[in-house]
Amino acid sequence: MTTAKLLDFRKDGDWYIFRITAKGEDFAKAIEALKRAIPLVHRRYDPETKTWSVATQYGPELAQIFANGAQCVRLVECQLRLF
C-alpha cells in the first residue's frame, strides 16, 4: 500500500471514477501499482480532467493500493444500497 489517496471517488454504472493525490515518488508508485493490478481494458485515464475510471470488479485492488481505498469503496457501495 502507498500513502497515495483517492479523491472525488464515485461510482458510475460499472466504473469507479476518481482522482489520485500523492507526492513525488509515492505518486509514481501508486500509478505503477494501479497499472500492474488492473488490466488496460478495465482502466481508463482522462488527462484533461486527471480522472481515472476503473471497473468496479477491481475494488479490492484499489483497497490494497491506496491508503483510503477500502474506505472509499465501502462508503460508495453503502451509499448506493440506501437508494
Image (cartoon, rainbow, N blue to C red):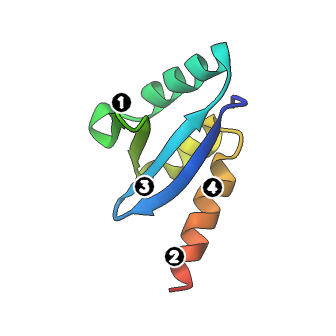
Residue at 58% over, 75% down = 79
- Residue 68 position, x and y percent, is 69, 46
Residue that numbered label 2 is attached to: 80
First in sequence: mark 4 or mark 2? 4
Amino acid of disc 4? Cys
Q: Nearer the viewer, mark 4 or mark 1?
A: 1
Q: Nearer the viewer, mark 3 or mark 4?
A: 4
C-alpha distance separating marks 4 and 1: 22 Å
Q: Is residue 27 above or below residue 45?
A: above
- Residue 27 position, x and y percent, is 60, 22
* Disc assigned to residue 72: 4
Q: Nearer the viewer, mark 3 or mark 2?
A: 2
Residue at 35% over, 30% down = 47
First in sequence: mark 4 or mark 1? 1
Task: Give neighbour class at mark 2: few <14, some 14-19, many 20+ (Cα, 10 Å).
Answer: few
C-alpha distance separating marks 1 and 2: 28 Å
